[in-house]
Amino acid sequence: MKALNTTISETPPSGIRRFFDIAAEMEDVISLGVGEPDFVTPWRIREAGIYALEHGYTTYTSNAGLAELRQLICAQLAERYAAEYAWDTECLITTGVSEGLDLALRVLLNPGDEVIVPEPCYVAYEPCVAFAGGTPVRVPTRWEDGFAVDPAVVEAAITPRTKAILIGSPANPTGAVQPRAALEGLVRLAEKHDLYLVSDEIYDRLTYDGTHTCLGAVPGARERTVVLGGFSKAQAMTGWRVGWICAPQAVAELCVRVHQYTMLCAPHVSQLAAIEALREADGDVEDMVADYDRRRRVFVKGLREIGLDCPEPGGAFYAFPSIRSSGLDSETFAERLLKAESVAVVPGNVFGPSGEGHIRCSYATALPQLEEALVRIDRFLTGL
Amino acid sequence: MREILELLEKDSTLSHTTLATMTGRSVAEVSAQVEAWEKAGVIRRYKAVVDWEKVDGADATEVTAFIDVAVTPARGVGFDDVAERLSRFAEVRSCYLVSGGHDLRCTVVGPNIRAVSDFVSRKLSTIDRVQATATHFVLKTHKQDGDSFTDPEPDHRLPVTP
């Protein structure tokens, strides 16, 4: 047989997979390894989805997505973050941010183009760059700096082949929110070196210490920035697979072109449910965010009390404590914790070398379970 | 501070330490505030939401009825004296003045249908100025005071996801 695609064959499977396989076999596991809300989609949104099915909205939509949904997304971006996008020429609906990321990178990159990816970062960033023909270039961030991106470190990694910088804030896995100054620094770099910026803002609503900065609204950024967002996290709609891209017209048009030949459109029912989410579910979102915030406070305080240094996560629903005091590497720590105490966490190194010495704990878990997990982790640490 | 009341209303077992952490306040501040609320009657008491069907089985669970009561109002007191008199019965769990076809809506609880019927015919209907009653027995509780009595939805999430 002839060889399969080299790029894809050479991309290792996600390091998370192995932990999934072990945890799935065990009983009484408290999982802090889940990257999605523990809330079910708010009922009013589900009910809108059921209504859509009942009334036969089972067809394709236009490639770019339902006009009403795009209008709502652009109106809310303008209102919340002063980010101005034309709904009809600069916005399209995707099957989640995952597709949005893939589209953006395919549209931006030519073979061999480099994309700077500050890490630790979401596991899909580097593979998606590679699948789009580009070369990911990792740039470290440090937990001592709260995982803020240092524009000077980024600039040192820029070469004539650099095409774009890919950043997620608030971030999976660190929960870090990039300070506005860091984002402005990246925009200056992008202007200076003529680079694009790809901004994954799926956790925009999940910020706890101040408001979110939309990269597209930072002065100078708009014409060179692709903003990715969606409904999976704040509206607890992971399985509906619906998100969006807002980008300058030239980029958005080409994103629609790829999307029309590959995905055709995002699921019709999901788009209608997303309309309901934007029209009616703000109260539900606020309640969920308030709940995450309370769990965050309890969990981070608990981690510190059992001796794990934890930078304050300002967003998303992850804590990324240091486990260096245990003397174990991330992978060993996570595996032994799972086997000894049935607590599943994700080792930090799967998100990049700067994640070594950390574990990712999701606090999208009921409070009693978080408290029990802290007791078990404490027992595990004491027994080392 | 309103947040603390809302949290306690949902789960009164939360400790003052947890409440303090959740809301970013000191434990002393939370304790003082809760004590002040208790003294002022803002927090009237703490109780548990019990699904008695799970304890006694569906057949042995006590019976609840909503009873609509038509009352002739009296000068000076309106419906208040009758409402208060009704409310004093331990069997009456709630009592509201309502708009619509009747005047008072009560929730009455008893060990069985006969006991509730007896209470209505002997005690409730015989109060002066009570003109008529309409009794609606509860057949099944689906949701009560914001708590769903059906089984919670299972967690369909995979144990580890990116």
Image (cartoon, rainbow, N blue to C red):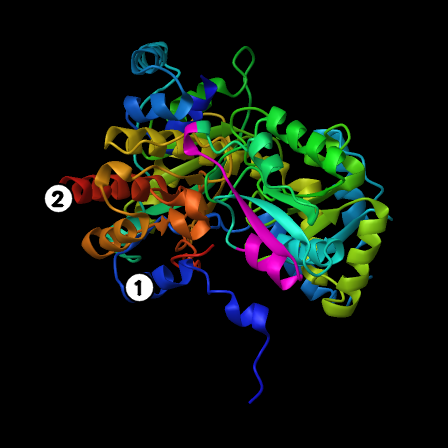
Quarter location, residue A155: top right
The residue to which callout 2 is attached is: A383
Q: Is residue A124 left or right of residue A16?
A: right
Q: In x, y percent, where is residue A218?
A: 72, 29
Q: Is residue A324 left or right of residue A171?
A: left
Hey, what amino acid is under mark 1? Ile
Quarter location, residue A50: bottom right
Q: Secondary structure at mark 1?
A: helix
The residue to which callout 1 is attached is: A22
Q: In the rendered structure, the residue with mark 2 lies on which chain?
A: A
Closer to us: B109 or A149: A149
Please rate how many residues cluster around mark 1, counting C-alpha atoms within 10 Å: few if below 14, some from 14 to 19, many from 20.
Answer: some
Residue A188's place in the image compared with B119, above or below, is: above
Q: Which residues are magenta?
A: A124-144
Hey, what amino acid is under mark 2? Gly
Q: Is residue A40 magenta?
A: no
Q: Quadrant of the N terminus of chain B?
A: top left
Residue B150's place in the image compared with A166, above or below, is: below
Q: Which mark is residue A303?
A: none
Q: In x, y percent, where is residue B133?
A: 49, 39
Q: Residue at x 74, y 31 (%)?
A: A217
Residue extending furthest toward the front:
A160
Q: In x, y percent, where is residue B124?
A: 40, 33
